[in-house]
Image: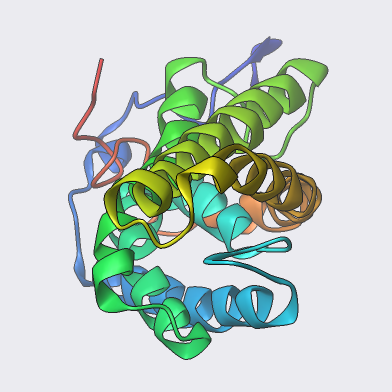
Amino acid sequence: MERTGERVSVWQRDSVAHQRGPNVGHFVVTALFVGIGTVVGAFGSLAVPLDFSAAFWPAQALQAVGGIWFGLWGGGIAAAIFPFFSNAIAGISVWVSLLFIPANFAQGMIPAWAFRRFEADPVLKTGRDYVIWTVSGVLIANLVGSLWSSIMLAFVTKAIPPDDWFSTWLGWFIGISVPSWILGVVRLKALSPLAARTRVFCRGYLSYSGLQWD
């Protein structure tokens, strides 16, 4: 988007039109992401299982782009809920899924915060945008998510031997980072222009205008 020769951030809110609050569409978005995430998450978990995780889990990219486009609705609430269903399909207990909530929430909201904080363009128009996506949406999000989850499995539930923690974490982190980067880029490039034109796109975290975590 350009205005008077200067780049205008998609996150800029400078008119009455940008003051819309949450609406029923945000609940629809949450339900949609839960449904899609369940299918995508279950496919990855069943296709390439790795103990209690998956070496190929494309659903993380869905969590990340959901937070970038739709704030807490797509990247917080939906990201925390849909793994319950995909994990159940893969045979993972509810107890373990409950322990994974902080990891799933973080994987959706870390890139959501970074894109708003640093005003990165979701369409990934510049090298800077790609760097912010790679660092926040892939490296940090997956590092936090895989560390938390593998620690819970090894040292809280003892579902895996503590001695196997490092190898489990490393395989988990590397295995989901590559597909999440590739699929995330494809989704952001192809669908961000459409998402930004909808009434449910969140310039804040709950609506077009706010909640802001500044």
Q: Is residue 106 left or right of residue 169?
A: left
Q: Residue at x 58, y 47 (%)?
A: 164
Look at 20% across and 63% down and name the residue there: 23
Q: How many numbered callouts? A: 0
Coordinates of residue 181 in the picture (x, y in percent):
75, 44
- x and y percentages locating residue 86 in the rendered image: 47, 80
Q: Is residue 158 visible?
A: yes
How is this picture coloured?
Answer: rainbow
On-image quarter of the N terminus: top right
Residue 134 lies, in percent from the top left, at: 70, 29
With respect to residue 47, does 15 lie above or below? above
Give the residue drawn at x 27%, y 56%: 99
Q: Image height check: is 107 above or below 44?
A: above
Tell me if 10 is positioned left or right of 61 in this view: left
Above or below: residue 156 compared with residue 11: below
Above or below, comparing residue 71 to residue 200 in the picture: above
Residue 43: name its quadrant: bottom right
Q: Within the image, what quadrant is residue 127 found in?
A: top right
- Tell me the quarter of the image containing the C terminus: top left
* Spot occupied by residue 56 in the image (x, y as percentages of width and height): 73, 63
Q: Quadrant of residue 12?
A: top left
Q: Please tell me which residue lies in front, 120 or 196.
A: 120
Looking at the image, can residue 1 be seen?
no
